[in-house]
Structure formats: C-alpha cells, structure tokens
Amino acid sequence: MSTGHGPTPSIDFDAPPADPVAVFEQWFAEAQKLPTPNPNAMTLATIDADGAPSARIVLLRGFSREGARFFTNRNSRKGRALAANARAALLFHWDLLDRQVRIEGRVSLASDAESDAYFAQRPVDSRVNAWASDQSEPVANRAELERRAAELTARFASGDVPRPPHWGGYRVSLDKIEFWQGDKYRLHDRIVYTRQADGSYAVTRLCP
C-alpha cells in the first residue's frame, strides 16, 4: 500500500473492487470534505475536427454508470470539438488527498429534460448570462458583455429565464477509468478499469 502523505488508500490496489463506480463515489465523497471550493472541478480534454487538442476546467454535475455529466454552451469551442469528435478525457486532481482519477470515453448529449432541470436550478443571473455570452467567440470589451447582460435581464424581467437551445449537458462514458494514489517516494499506486463488451470491467495494475 502507498506510504504517501495523503490518507491511507481506501482500496486495495493489489485486490481492487470489481466496480469502479463505487470506488469513484467513495473517493469523490472524501474529496467533497476537503477545504477546497470546487472538488467537482475536472479537466476536460477534446480533439477538434483538425486534430488539435484543447483542455479546460468544467464542473462535474452528475456521475453514474452511464458516465460523468457536465453542462455548457454547445456552440463553444469544446462543443464544436465534441460535435466533430465525440470522445473526451476527464481528469480530477485532489492534491490534498494526493489522488487523481482519469476517465476516457465516448460523449453523448444529455436529454432535454436533464438539461432543463439543471438549468432551472442555476441562479437567475447565471441563466441570463448563458444567453448573453457567445461562449468562445470574440467580444470587444467587458462593457459589451455587460450591455448584453443588462438587455437580457430586462427582456426576461417579467418571467422565467428559459434554457437557450444551444446550452445543455454532455455525458462522458466510463470506457476507461484510472485511479491514482500518490506515494511520497514516487512508487505511486495505479489501477485502470477498462470496460468490456459485456459491460464488465477488466482491471489492470499499472507501474507509476
């Protein structure tokens, strides 16, 4: 087992559980107890139509056997990349626990019902700004953004703010999910779960 500066690993890397979902849920629950503002922050890496990679931080907004879910403007750079190449990689890094989780998989759209339900939970200003921002497109200055936001605030003043048609959720399937536990002398513990055709997972221990 690891002798790192984080907590004792919650899984036996030499005899790991068969179910990676349960492992993730346990690790994520422990991460949520950390004194950090966004334990659900994850790096999302995509490849666009020209084969160029890009990465950015998004927030996990749901996790299940079907995959890891996040929401964004589908006209954004990441949205265009996912439309061209519907595969992605995710990375969680919880430094205070000396842990990482890596996920790779196919990407699908969340349903309209899921997207509507999550959008309705957002603060009103965030819903307005989802309309105001042409995410990833050029803008002249901050004043232009604030002008758009003010116009849309007035437009929606008399009622609810509906979800923009270009805004919604994505789900990254759990085709591969790797758990990494750090060790202070660099003999890190790593296991990767690879989904098989029958839905089960093959589990492999990796060198650090």
Image (spheres, rainbow, N blue to C red):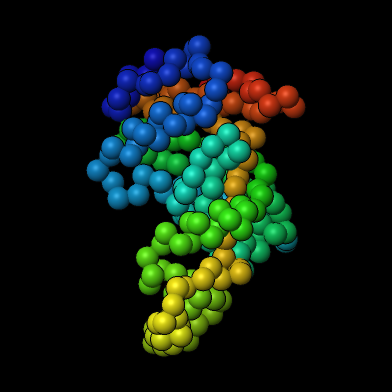
Instruction: Find residue 143 and report its image quarter.
Output: bottom left
Left or right, 106 with reference to 123: right
User: Looking at the picture, does residue 68 appear above or below residue 113?
Assistant: above
Residue at the location (59% across, 26% down)?
Answer: 193
User: Looking at the picture, does residue 76 appear above or below residue 51?
Assistant: below
User: Looking at the picture, does residue 51 appear above or below residue 91?
Assistant: below
Seen as rendered, the residue at the extreme left is 35
- Coordinates of residue 185 in the picture (x, y in percent): 36, 24
Instruction: Find residue 166 and report its image quarter.
Output: bottom right
User: Looking at the picture, does residue 141 appear above or below residue 204?
Assistant: below
Residue at the location (46% across, 62% down)?
Answer: 120
Residue at the location (51% across, 40% down)?
Answer: 63
- Coordinates of residue 89 in the picture (x, y in percent): 58, 45
The quadrant of the image that shows the N terminus is top left
Towards the viewer: 114 or 29: 114
Towards the viewer: 64 or 90: 64
- Coordinates of residue 114 in the picture (x, y in percent): 56, 53
- Coordinates of residue 13 in the picture (x, y in percent): 47, 17
Seen as rendered, the residue at the extreme top is 15
Instruction: Find residue 4 and report its image quarter.
Output: top left
Residue 56 can be seen in this image: no
Give the mark count: 0
Residue 24 can be seen in this image: yes
Towards the viewer: 119 or 135: 119
Left or right, 182 with reference to 113: left
Residue at the location (61% across, 52% down)?
Answer: 110
Towards the viewer: 111 or 31: 111
